[in-house]
Amino acid sequence: MSRARDLRPPRGTTALELDPLAAISARGFLIVVAVVSLICAVGLTLATREQISSWPMAIAAVVALAGGYAWFARSAFRGGAGVTSDRFALAFALIALGTVLNSLSCLGTNLAIRDDWGLITIGLALMAAAPFRTSSELGVYAAISVALAALLAVVHVILSFTGGFPPLIVVTVAVAPALAFGLGSAAYARELLTGIYAERLMQAEARNQQFDRLRQEFVDDDVVGEMGGLRAEVVPFLARIRQAGIVTADDRALAGRLVQNLQAAVAAPRHVDSLGDHAGRLIDESGLSPRLHEDDRATIRALLIGLETSSLTVPGSIVVEFIEGESDRFGMVRCASDDVRALRDEVMPFLRMVRLMFRTASEQVKGRELLVQFDIERLA
Amino acid sequence: MCVAYHGGRVGGRFFRERTAERVRVTLQIAADVGGVATSRALGKAGIWLACVFVGATALIAALLIPLTGHVEILFGVGALLVCAAGVVLALLTPGFTRAVIFTLVACAGLYGFAVVAAEVSVAVPAPTPSSDYVLLSMPEFAVLVVGISRRSLATALALGTLGFVAGPGLVQLAAWQEGMPLAVDVPVLASFVALSLFVTALWLARRDAARGTALMSGAALAEEKDVALGRFSHRAATWVHDTVLSDLRVIAAGEPGPLDERQLAAIDRDLANLADTRLILEVRGANGSATRALSTVPMLVAVVRGAEQAGLELRVSGDIPAVNALSATALRSLERAIAECLDNVVKHSGVREAEISVMSSPPELSVMVSDAGVGFDVNDTTVDTIGLRMTVVDAIVEIGGSVQIWARPGAGTAVFMTVPGVPQ
């Protein structure tokens, strides 16, 4: 693999823009981080309840944290643009508000800065954001988090802590989690983007090699020579009259017949469509399949292969149907199974991919059948 | 004839620039099929986490030297460096056995620091803290991350557990040896549980994604195969139609008699091409697509591929990777402008070929989209030409760039766009 330092991924690009499928793991990670953060917040609030001087603020802090993660998760799970810069800014603002409220809820009564959960959760939120946002953004958020943590620590040094450790030590303890998670998240985002970009180049090379190999196979199989008896009849005919340098009446008649054969071969439909290879039946009366956008076809193909290779699918039951109306086009994939719900769970990554690719896509279980429907908005 | 449009520079848009973003789903997607990129990224994150926690501990320890008068704390700081080196190496090494060894080295360093820290804590004339105090906790966090970069769940959890047992375990041992009150370090225990959950969740999600990505990559290759074969067949049929079929028609329609020079030359050409059909497929347009040249510039792939699927044959030349140096805003505006230019070629030029040239001269980057089509009068104010100018000029001028449009009826069109924001 070409290594990262030589690569120049596009500025301002997030890992998920290059690899939308990584959204599956990023969302899972986000949910776990959110749950852990909330457990940490509630747990530490209860464990250090004797330090709380304002319960309304303590409760509001947890609510703000939950609100921030809820907004973050909602953004991550929506279709389209996902966690945009603006959306993450709002989520971060709510989580940061939780941090401030948590800190202020024990103002004057705080015994140890390490008990303040807000200083940890603000960093965890940045870790969860790493696949969704750019490293430069995360670096800025890390700086904001560190500044906030330092400010809150100073406030507590002045108002809460009496004697004990020097302020610099308290501030260092306070900023360490935010700094560690912030820098970690920025490094994660940067390395992930570079790694995916490198993989992308490798795949481009693989496609180039496939293209060259296919062209060679096309030549080796003499597909051109097979057209309308080109190799078997036309070449000998042309070679003969070239050698003779003269055309007879019989040659004219033969040329006419060869023209007819070639004309038919040239006019024959040449589109290669292997999509139906993965289905028991392909219904496409309007000839929509060959006109679909390449990316959409690949998505449908992936779903079909996923269904085809599942042991839960009733063999031969996969039906693909494309319908084109006057103003709209849509597609359906149907598949029978004795355990449709298990089948749906098994092919869930491909169903998610279908939802990513097609703006309006849905799946439902109808009796023994799994039905996937999607609108087709673009054509090749 | 040429018209030019210029815009002022726009700066300071760190966050605003991404408000109009959208997901670009394309089969040029990479997909971290083997999870390699994710593992490396987690490794890098772990290194920063560990280094910050160890660094913060070292800083606090150093600050305590003048306060306590115990210079031996410096040995503890040295042990912390060993600890950090062990964690970093454990995260970077691909082999599990070596990762175990480096983890043990890290734990040994942590133990060395804990012995010094506990000894000093007991010795100073102040209430002795228990073994869960922050100076011992922070480097323990560093050791917990040793397993996060492993690609298998079992090894990740095994290494993390080793770090948890040997790291904080040895710290407790050191505290006990030095007579420090023992206490369960709840934050460290909770962090271990949380980290194990993170690793498990990420691994499970990645397993799902990996299956999907592997299949999607296969499906994309199959799709490209269909497209390539279709392109070859189309090219072959076109060639047969334009050459052999045409020549045979002339023969069939002509009078019997000697072949003239032109017919003989045509037959020679047909026979030569049929002797080696690679020549037929070597022509431009049958040799893959411009998106191949753009594999290093993912943000432009979608627009170029779209134009190709609309029937354009594109040639892309120049310093293409320089496009990646543009800011996200500039890149998206450029993408919008290029898309409009190519759309105009498809709809109005009357030709099926266009060229995109990229020229980089920091701090600016120029892109020219040109065709040899019917062109137009730049003073024309029909809907078509206004559409081109409105979209292209708006997109480029609003980010401080400039646009020059050269066009003349019958002589093609060239749109020259210059955008700022390329680092020197």
Image (spheres, coloured by chain):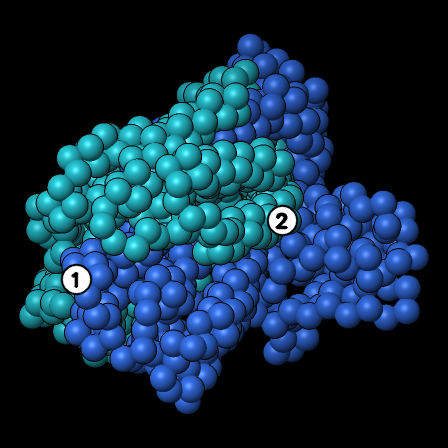
Q: Which chain is blue?
A: A
Q: Secondary structure at mark 2?
A: helix
- Label 1, label 2: how far apart the Cα atoms are: 43 Å
Q: Nearer the viewer, residue B76 or B403?
A: B76
Q: State the residue position of label 1.
A: A167
Residue in the image at 20% along x and 56% along y: A169
Which residue in the rendered view is the most extreme toward the bottom?
A56
Q: Which chain is cyan?
A: B
> For the residue carrying disc 1, how many other residues have a C-alpha within 10 Å: few (<14), some (14-19), or many (20+)?
some
Q: Position of residue A35 (x, y in %)?
A: 54, 66
Q: In the rendered view, tell whether residue A122 sits above or below residue B31.
A: below
> For the residue carrying disc 2, how many other residues have a C-alpha within 10 Å: few (<14), some (14-19), or many (20+)?
some
Relative placement, left or right, of A141 versus A249 is: left
Residue in the image at 54% along x and 30% along y: A210
Q: State the residue position of label 2.
A: B204
Q: Nearer the viewer, residue B219 or A186?
A: A186
Which residue in the rendered view is the most extreme toward the front?
B125
Q: For mark 1, name the chain.
A: A
